[in-house]
Image (spheres, helix red, strand yellow):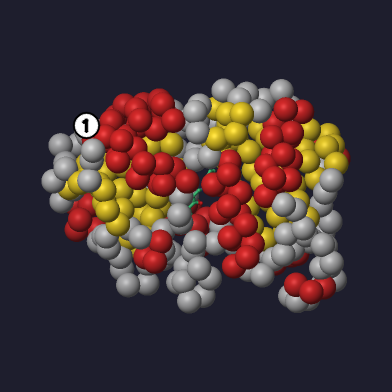
Amino acid sequence: MIVYLDGKYVDSNEAKVSVFDHGLLYGDGVFEGIRLYEGNVFRLAEHIERLEYSAKAILLELPWTTQELIDITCETCRRNNLRDGYIRLVITRGVGDLGLAPWLCPKPTLFVIASTIQLYPKEHYEKGLAIVTVPTRRINPAALPPTVKSLNYLNNILGKIEAKQAGALEGIMLNDQGYIAECTADNLFIVHKGAVITPSASQGALKGITRDTMFDAAKDLGIPMREQNLTRYDVWCADECFITGSAAEVIPVVKLDGRVIGDGKPGPITAKLLANFRQRVTREGVKL
Ligand code: PXG
């Protein structure tokens, strides 16, 4: 596998970052997880925009133009002869002496991994997922805005472990106020009386690229969709529920904490949104 690292395309065995990289020492950096479908890098411009906003939010000045980041991402895919897969783009504060201060790092580190992806088993799309509410809360925006896709994923990781310990693949994370923020690596939606509803970014949701795509899909299909504060009660009483993410795409959710949602089967609106999403993945983005 060929990896882009700091200006060079190198074999993955040689793609090594320093132990003094602040991304490793302090989780000081940002990243993106992007999908490649049939040679189409899905919504790449949107991913790069989110990356640039994440960097801006942590005062990490990027020496690359948007077009350079797009070109490097595509070239990494090409060098691996990849047509379908998963791309991880990471920018760290860079190598510096010990000490939190970011000004110890003269230049950011950039690496891009283009690899294959372990897809979720097909049965989840057909039968739906049983998820749980995890005890770990979504990070408070006053501490670190959860809209920043940073290298600080520990609270999501704790949530992921808690979900697994409860026998579930994904878990809902509440915010400090007890409202639903999202899942550990996916956004959450419910369908109620024909409308699709999802928590806003201000409640702790990441502005997911797949989530954005749902708004466009719903518009296409004439399905009303809105952002609204959600509690677990809203999920208990929802007609349908689903999660979205670059890895998960759109997966129906049929149970929360052992409670059946709706009629316990993937719902028709979820199915329509998933079908619309699948039509978009090879069309919207940057062709290799
Ligand atoms: N919330 C969080 C906290 C995420 O990390 C999403 C929502 C969904 O956003 P997108 O833009 O993907 O629709 C994410 C995305 C991984 C992996 O390697 C994680 C994500 C995406 C792809 C792979 O576990 N997180």
Q: Quadrant of the C terminus?
A: top right
Residue 27 image offset from top left, x and y in percent: 67, 63
- The three-letter code of the residue at mark 1 reads Pro
Q: Is residue 175 left or right of residue 156?
A: left
Secondary structure at numbered mark 1: helix
Residue 23 image offset from top left, x and y in percent: 72, 60
Q: Quadrant of the N terminus?
A: top right
Residue 136 image offset from top left, x and y in percent: 42, 64
- Say few, some or many: other residues with alpha carbon within 10 Å of mark 1 (under 14 / 14 to 19 / 20 or more): few
| Number of marks in picture | 1
Is 5 in front, or is 45? 45
Q: Is residue 220 left or right of residue 102?
A: left
Question: Can you tell which quarter of the image residue 20 is in?
Answer: bottom right
Question: Which residue carries the number 1 mark?
Answer: 268
Residue at figure coordinates x 16%, y 43% from the top left = 194
69 to 103, vertically: above or below: above
126 to 159, vertically: above or below: above
Residue at figure coordinates x 82%, y 73% from the top left = 104
- Can residue 130 be spotted in the picture? no
Is 281 in front, or is 148? 281
Q: Is residue 52 left or right of residue 264?
A: right
- Can residue 107 be spotted in the picture? yes
268 to 131, vertically: above or below: above
Question: Can you tell which quarter of the image residue 38 is in?
Answer: top right
Residue at figure coordinates x 41%, y 41% from the top left = 213
Residue 116 image offset from top left, x and y in percent: 62, 30
Is 232 in front, or is 108? 108
Residue at figure coordinates x 50%, y 26% from the top left = 282
